Amino acid sequence: MADNNNLTEGLVYNYTSATEPPTRDTRIEPTNAFLGSCHSLKRALGQGCAKFNSRYFSQGIGCQLILALGIVRTFQNVVTIIHGPLGCASNNIGLAGFNKTSRALKGKPANDVIWIHTNLNEADVIGGGVEKLKNAILYAEREYRPDVIVIGNSCVPGIIGDDIDSLVDELTPEVSAKLVPVHCEGFRSRFVASGYDAAYHGLLKKLVDPPLRLASVLTGSKEEEARLEKIRRENSRTVNLLNVGSTSYGDEVELSRILSSLGLKVNVLPLYGNIDEIARMGEAALNISICATHDDYLVGHLKERFGTPYVIDTLPIGLKNTNQWLRAIGKALSLETETEKLIELETNQLLEAVEPFKKTLAGKSLWVGGGETRIFTTAEFFQSLGMKVLGLKPHNFDRFAIPMLDDIEDPETAVAVAAGQPAEEIVYLKRLKPDLYVGHGGANGWVLRLGIPTIPLYGQSQNHMGYSGAYELARKAARALLNTNLAKKVAANVTLPFKQKWYDSDPKNNIKEIPNEETLRSSVL
C-alpha cells in the first residue's frame, strides 16, 4: 500500500463548521454487499458499481450508536447520555464491564462507566424529547460533575427532529462540563462504521484545542519565548498513535516500543484518554493511524484544522505490513536510516522466532473474517508462513483496502463482504472446509459447530500487532491446529439452524447488483 496521505485528496469537507459528518456512503463509496473473488471485487470497485449493491434478505447488521459510544464512553470522567428509546441502551451493561477491564489493563483509573438514558416513549415521539434531554444534562452535571457530557443521538430523535445542537448551545453557559453532541442516527447510512466518524466529529469540534505550537507569544518575555520553544521542540518529536476499540494494551505497548526506538514520544489516543490529553491532540508532529476504517475522518479533520500530517498506510500486523507501516512513519519524519536499522534487527529476530511454527502451519488453509484492513493483513501474514488463504469476509470494503487485494496470492480467493450475515459465510465455510478460522468476536460460536478450529482476530488481553504480535499470532494458530478436539466435540453435539436446502443454494443469489452505466448502455443498444 502506498503512502496514503493522498487518499483523501479531492474529497473536500468543511469539518469545522458542519453539524455532523457526511455519511460514508457518499464520502468513500464503500460496499457491504458483495460475494465473489479478490479479482472480481477489485474490478467491481474499479467500475464503481459495487457501492450500489444490497441484499434481498439481511440477517443482521450493527448499530452506529454502539460504535460511536464505544469510543466516547472510554474517556476518563465522562457521562454519556443516550437520547432515544430504552432499547438503544441494551448493550451498555455488558460493555461497561469491558470498558472497566480495558481501563485497568491500560493502567488507567478503573472508574465505573456512567450513562443516562432519556427513555423516549410514544408521547415523546409526538411532542418531542428535548425537555427530557435537557433534564438529563442538568442531572448529569449536578450529580457527577464530569469533565465531559456526551449526547448520543439515536434514530428516533433524529427522525422526529429534536434539535440537540441548539440545546447544547443553550446549556453550555450553565454547566461546567463540555457538552459534545454525537449524531449517530443509524438510518443515515448503510455502514455502521459511520459511527466512528460521528464520535470523532463531536470530539474534534468540542474537545480539541488550538495547538500551542501555533500560539503567539503574548508577553514577549525571553522566559516565555524559551518555554514555548522548548515545548515546540518536544512536540516536533511527538506523535499521536491513534488507538481503536480492538487495540489491546499489549498492542499499544508493542507499537509504542517500536516508535520509541526511533526516539519518538508517543501519545496513545484518543480512547481511554483524559480531557487534557485529548485537548492537546493538535500539538503532535504526526498522527499515526493503525486502521483507516476508524481513522480517516479523524486524521483528515486534524490536517484541515491544524495542518498536521498523518500516516494511514496499513495496519501493522505481520512482518510485511509492520515494516511497511514503520517505513511510512520513518519517511514522514525523515528518519529513513534509523527506521531501516530497526526493521533489520526486528525482522531477523521475528523470522528466527516463528520458524518452529512453520512446520505445523505449512500447507494448512484458513478463512479470515472481520474488519477489512485487519483481516487482509492477518491473512497475508499467515500466507507468508506457508498457509493457503481460502477466503476472507470483510465487514465492508472501500478504497483504502484495494491495494491489499494484491497481497493475496490467488486472485480467485473467495471474498464475502458483509456486516453480519453469518448464514452466507457458513455456506462458504461448509463447502471450503478450511483448517482454521480466524475471526471477529462472536463468530467462533457459529464456526465451531462446523468442526473448524478457531482463534480470535483480536482481544483486549492479547497482542496481535507489531513484531511481538506476529509471533503471538503464529503461536496461537499452531496451538489451535495441534489440538482440534474442541471443534470436533462441538460439531458432534451441536447443530446449526440451517436446512440442507440452504447449504445447497448459492449465496450470491441474495445480492442485488446494480449494473454500471456501460452495462446499461449495452442493454439499451
Image (cartoon, grey):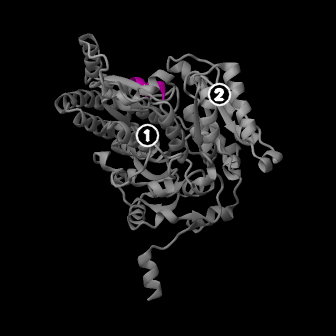
Q: Does the magenta stretch include residue 252?
A: yes
Residue at 53%, 38% (x, y): give it. 202
Q: Nearer the viewer, mark 2 or mark 1?
A: 1
- Please report the bounds of the magenta region as a residue range: 248-253
Q: Which residue lies furthest to the top in this view?
A: 223
The amino acid type found where label 2 is placed reads Ala
On residue 298, the disc is 1
Secondary structure mostly seen in the magenta stretch = helix
- Compared to 284, does 26 lie above or below? below
- Residue picked out by circle 2: 96
Q: Which residue lies furthest to the front in this view?
A: 219
Left or right: residue 303 versus residue 132 is left
Q: Is residue 76 magenta?
A: no
SS label for mark 2:
helix
| Residue 315 visible in the current orientation | no
SS label for mark 1:
helix
Structural distance between the alpha carbons of marks 2 and 1: 25 Å
